[in-house]
Amino acid sequence: MIVVIGKNGQLAKAIKNTNPDVLCLGREEIDVFDSQACTEKITALNPIGVINASAYTAVDLAESEPKNAFALNELAVKNIANAASKMNAHLVHVSTDYVFSGSKGSPYLPNDSHQPLNAYGASKAAGESILLSEFADCSCILRTSWVYSEYGNNFVKTMLRLMAEKPELQVIDDQVGSPTSAHTLAKTCLAAFNEKLTGAHHVTDEGVTTWYDFAMAIQELGLTLGMLEKQIPIKPVPTIAYPTPAKRPTYSVLSKASLKEIIPYIALEHWRKPLLKVLQELNTPN
């Protein structure tokens, strides 16, 4: 059995959709902040693998409450890794492009140095450092970016809502990255467990875009599928037009070369194809 921690998030739901046999745990079932309680729960379940899909992801809020971010993204990661290692259960931990500064200008490699710009990124980097230093032989880190799906709250669903409500939109056009369907990430998490990957690796869908061009594609496909009644003007604007408490990296492209070499059967598609699939799912009556 594989245990997935963070059952209410979009990644856990996508993993469950990919492999219904996984056991997803939420805060009601496991206390990741209590080392002993976490170990006792994992010991009782005796899994062969653990996927940590839980994280503190409120990027701007983390600036004013960094303790909460570090509690879930560093302390809890150590507790989960410690519990998994005691049961010889391989750990797959999901991380983020935000551990980097975004100033490199070419795709980030898995072994590039941490240079977070904000508290959220610093907390995720701290969690990574624990795994790389203390649990290197029994865990792997999968960094990703711009995750979306038909589940939960994400950029795609927000854009669809705003496109239906607003007469026009302004979307940032000077942040560059790669959208990632939670379903792509889910398949990769399961493959990483099967291959017992160690170290840090990167996974996103193929292709590079901006938030503005991503939004334009969402509108185009939304109109084609009949999810939107009419086209609205979308204006590209610089990041400075939308000041936020947390600074964002301007370049979040991640090199996937190491992952493709080790798991060549993970067929990564251009981001527009997974986007279409998610939109079709959202457009299908339950």
Image (tube, rainbow, N blue to C red):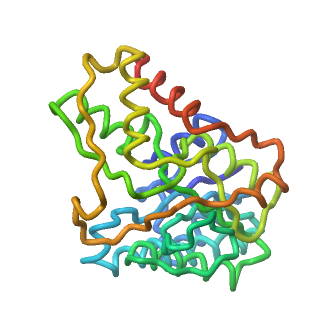
Residue farthest along the bottom direction in this orientation: 133
Of residues 105 and 122, the one nearer the viewer is 105
The total number of labels drawn is 0
Question: What residue is drawn where x is 74% and y is 68%?
Answer: 87
Give the vertical position of 193 relative to 80 (above or below): above
Q: Quadrant of residue 284?
A: top left
Residue 47 visible to the viewer: no
Question: What residue is drawn where x is 45% and y is 26%?
Answer: 279
Q: Quadrant of residue 282?
A: top left
Q: From the viewer's perspective, is 268 left or right of 8? A: right
State the image coordinates of residue 273 (x, y, percent, origin top left).
58, 30
State the image coordinates of residue 276 (x, y, percent, origin top left).
51, 27
Q: Quadrant of residue 265?
A: top right
Give the vertical position of 207 relative to 126 (above or below): above
Q: From the viewer's perspective, is 171 left or right of 253? A: left
Residue 171 visible to the viewer: yes
Of residues 247 and 127, the one nearer the viewer is 247
State the image coordinates of residue 271 (x, y, percent, origin top left).
57, 39
Quadrant location of the C terminus in the rendered image: top left
Q: From the viewer's perspective, is 136 left or right of 251? A: right
Of residues 70 and 161, the one nearer the viewer is 161
Question: What residue is drawn where x is 55% and y is 40%?
Answer: 14
Of residues 72 and 280, the one nearer the viewer is 280
